[in-house]
Amino acid sequence: MKKIIIAVAIGLASGWVTAMAGGALNAHPDSQTWENLFATDLSNAVSPPGVWSWKNGVLSPKDKDETIWTKKEYENFALDLEFKLDPGANSGVFVYCTDMKNWILNHVEIQILDDPSPKWAKVPPTWRCGGIFGHSAPKKLPTKKYGEWNRMTIRCQGPTISVMINGELVTDIDMRNWKSGKINPDGSAIPSFEPQILSEMATKGHIGLQGAHGGIPTHFRNIKIKSLD
């Protein structure tokens, strides 16, 4: 019992609390003192010219679906951010990307989607907001309607990825369980255009924010990262 109490106290003191079993998220962290993922002048980013920019603390893309990437590669990290959707928005946070030019086959995507939009009414469950796109459906859909800010915390430690949105744990996976590029462990189909076998993928790489897919932007602010090493 003493060990558990000490572990919880350490977690609270560091602004990061995880479940005692499995390492899944159990609360959003206090990330105010964490490192900014992107500098205000984007000097630490690989950014397509004229697409991404900061305004009043908000990072947004213009009407182009071009990703902004970190120059640095990350492994074992927690990423905390807020996102706001325009109507019908479809975006994502890319982690573990090992090839920014051929990123579609070399990344894991945490999906961001305007779930209530009629445009996305018939998409598969694995396309919903907070899931691992094409591979794992979110357990819950706590995303607010377009125009409101949502908070997302992503915890990546080796092959385990946990996602929390607005205080709800929506995803908690172990990539080692995905041994096919066609069928997920629950029997659902993996999109043919993203046939990654998650169990074979690297767990270190660049982090990216997807641009304005379909010309509809998603906006980001308070994008903070912390190493879990």
Image (cartoon, rainbow, N blue to C red):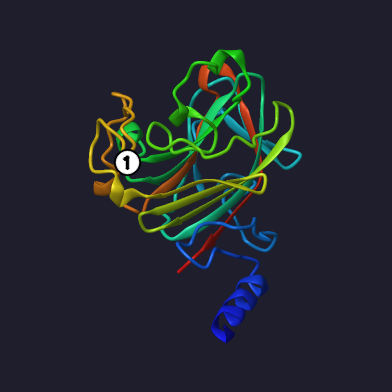
Report helix, strand or loop for mark 1. Answer: loop
- The residue that appears at 60% across and 34% down in the rendered structure is 141
Residue sitting farthest toward the top: 118
Q: Residues within 10 Å of mark 1 (few under 14, many from 20)?
A: few
Q: Nearer the viewer, residue 23 or 48?
A: 23
Task: Return the residue nearer the eye: 34 or 116.
Answer: 116
Q: From the viewer's side, name the closer residue of 9 and 60.
A: 9
Q: Which residue occupies the foreground of this view, 155 or 69?
A: 155
Give the residue at x 55% y 33%: 129
Total marks placed: 1
Amino acid type, label 1: Asp
Judged from this view, the residue extending furthest toward the bottom is 2
The image position of residue 162, as x and y in percent, is 49, 51
x and y percent of residue 26 in the render? 59, 58
Along the horizontal axis of the image, is 164 left or right of 185? right
Q: Position of residue 207 (x, y in %)?
A: 46, 46
Q: Residue at x 53, y 21 (%)?
A: 64
Q: Is residue 208 left or right of residue 80?
A: left
User: Which part of the image, by quadrant, shows the N terminus?
Assistant: bottom right
Residue, far front? 1
Q: On the rendered image, what quadrant is the C terminus found in? A: bottom left
Q: Quadrant of residue 142?
A: top right
Q: How far from the left and from the top, in percent, is residue 125? A: 46, 28
Q: Above or below — where is 121 with respect to 110? A: above
**In the image, residue 19 above or below residue 94:** below
Residue picked out by circle 1: 99
**Quarter assignment of residue 165:** top right
Q: Indicate left or right for 64 with 149 as reference.
A: left
Residue 149: which quarter of the image?
top right
